[in-house]
Amino acid sequence: MLMPTYEELKRRSDVPPGSSWGLLGDLGTIGRLTPEIKRAAIRAVQTGETFNLDWPINAFDPPPSPTRHLARHHIFQRNPNHRDDYLDSFYLQSTTQIDGLRHHRHAEAGFYNFAKDEEIRAGSGPIGIEQWADFGIVGRGVLIDVERYLTHSRGRGLDHHTGEAFSAEILDQALAWQEIELREADILLIRTGWAGFYFRELTQEQRQALPGDNYSPGLEQSEKSLTWLWDSRAAMVASDNIGVEALPVVEGSPFLSIDPTGMMHQSMIALLGLALGELWRLEELADACHADGRYDMLVVCKPLSIMGGVGSPANAMAIR
């Protein structure tokens, strides 16, 4: 699927500059996953090993975002031989998740692909998460193990205590070290090691402090990062950290004029239509990839079919 480069997107005058509006429909980058791409992805399966890419519901206690809360799971019975269950306070993005295209609007351009503010409501309207559920997220996954590459190349991994930012050049270097090339519509899995750090090293007291004191290594906020993300031709970019990009944002983030947080989410989601995954479980997969030197796999991801949904648990699996 031939697409303009990011530099060409920035020169568009028919739609907001730097946007992919009108090129991929309401699916955004998930629309890159053509039937041919999906069929080709199956060739990445060699051993049949499967890896769950989801952390359990309520694994992050409390959820890293202060506006989200733990789900309450209830089991009940009609009679001694029956059981049923339900969830209360189920925040769809409180653990391993996908950010849908409703998750962020651009302060100047609005929601992705001409969607109007009044159309963004529960139960109906454009760019809801159910469109991805219907279309199917199936493709060749590529693990980019930034944490392991930096440990190899400089003798230490990312600084999880300060939320170290890394450049797009580091992604290219890690791919070269892993001896793998990207293809059209890959599902990129970026391992920072943050989730492993969270579960192995943080005390419950430190986890409780996270929502108000977020530190998570990730991609630096820069035009070069946006260029790399679009020009990589990825269908989805998922990471094991809080937001794919670094927290706190880099000093002097060029996105401060658009978003008071300085994050790239508005540009990634509302302009580019990029599907983002956050808090993915990549530790066991990364160990397997490192053990045999093979970093691609089939990835299947099934968002919940919630009409007009903003986000969803990922329900993701890697098959090697």
Image (spheres, grey):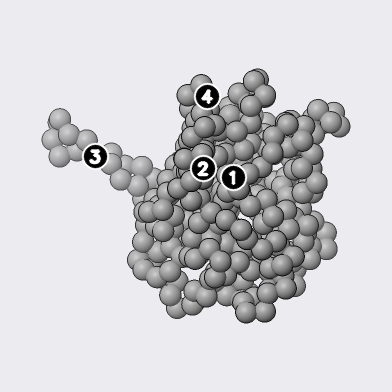
Sequence-wise, the earlier of marks 4 and 2 is 4
Residue 122 rendering spot, x and y as whole percentages: 38, 67
Say what amino acid the circle numbered 1 marks. Asp
The residue at which mark 2 appears reads as 139
Going by the image, does 110 lie left or right of 164?
A: left
Say what amino acid the circle numbered 2 marks. Gly
Residue 18 rendering spot, x and y as whole percentages: 68, 69
The residue at which mark 3 appears reads as 84
Q: Which residue is more in the foreground, 76 or 192?
A: 192
Identify the secondary structure beneath mark 2.
Answer: strand
Sequence-wise, the earlier of marks 4 and 3 is 4
- Residue at the spot 47% in from the left edge and 24% down from the top edge: 48
Sequence-wise, the earlier of marks 3 and 1 is 3
Camera sees residue 203: no
Q: What number is the disc on residue 125?
A: none
The residue at which mark 1 appears reads as 186
Q: Which residue is more in the foreground, 252 or 131?
A: 131
